[in-house]
Image (cartoon, rainbow, N blue to C red):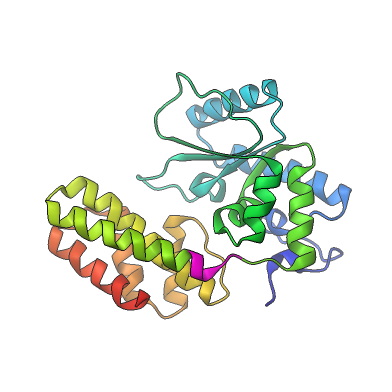
Amino acid sequence: MTTTLTRAWHEPPPFPEGMAQLAPIDAELWAHRLLFDRQRAARHQATDMAAITASIESSSRRRGVASLVLTGSTARGARSSVSDLDYHVIGARPSIEGLPAEIDLYCDEPAEFLAKLEQGDDFAHWTLRHGCVLFDSGALREAAAEVAERDLWPDPERKLRQARSTLDFAEQLLASGDQPAALEQVRGALSLTARWWLLANDVFPLARAELPGQLRKLHQPALARALNATIHDRPDPDALAASLAIARNLTR
């Protein structure tokens, strides 16, 4: 399997996103990535978001955190109306007291993060490939080098199990009549299904709003339309049920 992480180091990095995908074997290249990611994070955040990030970074540094990464749709510059602010912390959990509720903070110790990469956790892999690294004491650099040298790749079967489980719960919520909760859960189930399909076809998933475009390129227009509707519209219960049926047929 050929991945972006294993490209030759002498190849000039294609901007604006390619730098975040290179494996940081070389210290100079890694320093370049940190600078580029800092610029990318600034470019993709509005003033209020940047203030939240600055607060979390300050708290992280006080706690002696090893690494802090801005992840998710914000890191990709692909936010939608359903986007949160996502961060991946390597080390102790920083304080987010008093900050907005739409923050998702994921924390791993360095050894735990590396174990997740080895086990095929796609979220950990996403952090390395597409996250904006705000600072790093070396834990991420070492992990990325390990991924490149061993050609590690997320486990599609792991994502398939997650998709099936979430589809079950989405069907239950839809049957309960709780439309807002059902919409959120269906969106999550379709996203997991999309990520599984892409990984199984050797394509690394991007941010949620970018998944429909990736699906169309892999000849899955029905799933692409269904997911896009849950992101940008408010489908009625019948449309949500039809979307779940599309995903269910794919994951059987």
Query: What type of secondary structure mainly makes up the magenta span?
Result: helix
Residue 206 position, x and y percent, is 52, 60
| Relative horizontal placement of residue 108, taking residue 198 as reference (left or right) | right
Residue 145 position, x and y percent, is 79, 57
Q: In which quarter of the image is residue 94?
A: top right
| Relative horizontal placement of residue 106, taking residue 30 as reference (left or right) | left
Towards the viewer: 32 or 70: 70
Q: Quadrant of residue 83?
A: top left
Residue under the point 44% across and 47% down: 79
Towards the viewer: 40 or 96: 96
Using the image, determine if residue 20 lies above or below residue 46: below
| Relative horizontal placement of residue 222, taking residue 132 as reference (left or right) | left
Q: How many marks?
A: 0
Camera sees residue 23: no
Residue under the point 31% across and 71% down: 247
Towards the viewer: 185 or 229: 185
Towards the viewer: 106 or 83: 106
Q: Quadrant of the N terminus?
A: bottom right
Residue 159 position, x and y percent, is 47, 64
Camera sees residue 246: yes
Q: Quadrant of the C terminus?
A: bottom left
Using the image, determine if residue 174 lies above or below residue 45: below
Asked whether 28 falls inside the magenta stretch, the response is no
Q: In which quarter of the image is residue 211?
A: bottom left
Magenta residues? 154-158
Residue under the point 80% across and 65% down: 149
Using the image, determine if residue 167 lies above or below residue 231: below
Residue extending farthest bottom: 219
Residue under the point 20% across and 69% down: 242
| Relative horizontal placement of residue 21, taking residue 186 as reference (left or right) | right
Residue 86 position, x and y percent, is 51, 41
